[in-house]
Image (cartoon, helix red, strand yellow):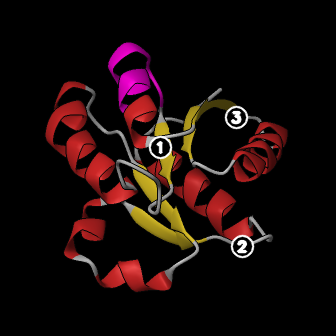
Amino acid sequence: MARVLLVDDSESIRLLYEKELEEEGYEVVLAASGEEALDILEKENVDLVVLDIKMKKMSGLEALQHIVQHIVKEKNNLPVILCSAYSSYQDDFSSWLADSYVIKSSDMSELKGEIRRLLQKYGKE
């Protein structure tokens, strides 16, 4: 069973996505901030990260840079999906470090498809 780290500062989004992803058969680890996500990544193994961009203190783009610079070197093949309500961040060069960019929606089929695709690509499913 693949472990997905879901990072979002909105509790309702975390709970909704957790339920949906668990129904898909994933083990879901939750983080409410970029800092919490980095702490989890230092201590635990996960197979994929779903990362919100607009968060207090540390943005998802800042967390993504840290993940790419420090975590990915230690844990090869850690795919990251940026998941944001704002499409404008797709044009930010920092967002290009992610493996995928998905616009938040009540229809989670695109996100689920990207998770499946990336886990298969990296041999984690």
> Do the residues bearing badges 1 and 2 touch, measured as CB atoms within 8 Å?
no
> Do the residues bearing badges 2 and 3 touch, measured as CB atoms within 8 Å?
no
Residue 75 at what x, y percent from top left? Answer: 27, 27
Q: Amino acid at mark 2?
A: Ser
Q: Amino acid at mark 3?
A: Tyr
Residue 91 at what x, y percent from top left? Answer: 30, 84
Name the secondary structure under disc 1: strand
Q: Nearer the viewer, residue 87 or 4?
A: 87
- Residue at which label 2 appears: 105
The magenta span reads: 38-46
Q: CA distance from mark 3 to mark 1?
A: 12 Å
> Image height check: is 114 above or below 18?
below
Q: CA distance from mark 2 to mark 3?
A: 19 Å
Check if residue 13 falls in the magenta segment. Answer: no
Estimate how packed mark 3 is, as few (under 14), some (14 to 19) or many (20 or more) residues with alpha carbons within 10 Å. Answer: some
- Residue at which label 1 appears: 49
Residue 19 at what x, y percent from top left? Answer: 83, 42
Quadrant position of the C terminus in the picture: top right
Estimate how packed mark 1 is, as few (under 14), some (14 to 19) or many (20 or more) residues with alpha carbons within 10 Å. Answer: many
Residue occupying the far front of the picture = 57
Secondary structure character of the magenta stretch overall: helix
Residue 117 at what x, y percent from top left? Answer: 54, 57
* Image side of residue 18 versus residue 70, left or right: right
- Residue at which label 3 appears: 26
Identity of the residue drawn at 44% across and 61% down: 53
Identity of the residue drawn at 46% across and 69% down: 101
